[in-house]
Image (cartoon, grey):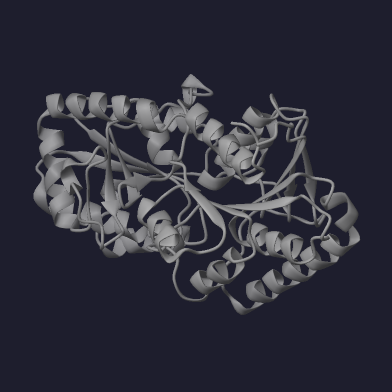
Amino acid sequence: MVNRPLNKILHVLPTFCKGGGEKLVHDLCNHQVQSIAVVDILCVYKNTYQGQFLTDTLNPLVKINYIISKEQDKSLGNSFLEILSKIFLYLKIVLWFFGNKKRIYEYDIVHVHMTYGAFFGTLVYLFRPRTSKLKVIETNHTDSSSIRGMLKVFFSINRKFRDGIIFELKKDDYTEHVRKGDRPRSTFIPIGTSYVAPMNELNIVPKHQDIFVIGQVGRIHFYDRRTDLYIKLIKELNLLTNINFIFHVYGDGPDRANFEKMVESYDLSDRFRFFGYTDDIGSAFKSVDLYVTINVGENCGVAGLQAIWSKVPTVAIQVDETYTSNGLKDNIPNAVDLKALASYMNSLMLEKQNLQVLQKRQFEYISQNHSIENYCSKTEVFYKRLFELKV
């Protein structure tokens, strides 16, 4: 093995806005810039509505560039006109790539994330000069349970044009990749994050002693994020419990209007309170007694882990029907059966001591397994192994 520094890394992603994958890129860049000479970010477009917080807290040594100058305040959906807009973005990516090829191949690593990043990484891989030592790495921010149809085909095809794959959500996906002997080298690195302090104490919604507050933070999207399941869960809990409770929804997204209509159709308007998009998720966590997230196997996304770092006991709706491990006895208690999860939540609401026991157990678990320091250091170790450098 040799020992030389990795000097230049480029992270490529659709946009730099509020989201779990984007937050991981943000934290990874802030960590890497302390040991690597040049760490840059390339985004396809700029999100003016949900991206300022990540930009403001990014190390100023990390430069952000954009493929298109047009700004937009939301992710594109699946209407005919929006699909045409997506195709236009892919064409712009191709044109930008060929206009900047020389500049791209000056990097040691191009680390790609999510859809547009995956497409960009394939271009970099296919047109890489024979003399180039550049490595193309992809972090798989999703998993086989939550992506379906053409999107799953898209990622499967693009994954072949990589030097390395990082799995971070479902370890079974990594195990299956290794079992098949698929060519790109791979590793499993559990998601890492950290405590999020409230930005403004005035944003903390006061708790009332006679109302138990349940909460959720994230993008409202039925197909992608399965946020309709929160409503179905609250319907089951409402039928079961005698405790006065309310569900706080922090977030926005393409299905916000559909979410509110579904709440009305289930006659649950008095159980929900909508706060919209917020950068101050630290205050959101301080406003709730119990957090509900989505689990994929044993793991959840960044927001769920941040809630636990903020010492909020957390349970999860399980979307992976093949996961049959510890369920409600997991470190993040979870269930596919919403009635069973609602019953478990009711038992926590009835016995506050059980909430405290769960919170302490969860905090100890993520401190050992899901710190951002651990996530970043393991990522750099994987980089070096691809280059056969000393670790």
Residue placed farthest to the top in the image? 201
Identify the image quadrant of residue 265.
Answer: bottom left
| Residue 43 in the figure: left or right of residue 308 | right
Residue in the picture at 63% in, 32% down? 390
> In which quadrant of the rendered image does the C terminus lie?
top right
Residue in the picture at 49% in, 47% down? 187
**Nearer to us in this view, 364 or 176:** 176
Question: Looking at the picture, how far across and down is residue 261, in whole percent?
Answer: 37, 63
**Nearer to us in this view, 259 or 182:** 182
**Nearer to us in this view, 198 or 147:** 147
Total of numbered circles in the picture? 0
Depicted 313 relative to depicted 346: above or below? above
Residue placed farthest to the bottom in the image? 80
Depicted 375 relative to depicted 311: above or below? below
Depicted 236 relative to depicted 18: above or below? below
Residue in the picture at 28% in, 52% down? 317
| Residue 199 in the figure: left or right of residue 246 | right
Question: Looking at the picture, how far across and down is residue 236, in whole percent?
Answer: 17, 55
| Residue 202 in the figure: left or right of residue 158 | left
Identify the image quadrant of residue 28.
Answer: top right
**Nearer to us in this view, 300 or 234:** 300
Question: Looking at the picture, how far across and down is residue 284, in whole percent?
Answer: 42, 33
Question: Looking at the picture, how far across and down is residue 331, in whole percent?
Answer: 25, 37
Residue 287 visible from this viewpoint: no
| Residue 193 in the figure: left or right of residue 385 | left
> In which quadrant of the rendered image does the N terminus lie?
top right
Residue 316 visible from this viewpoint: yes
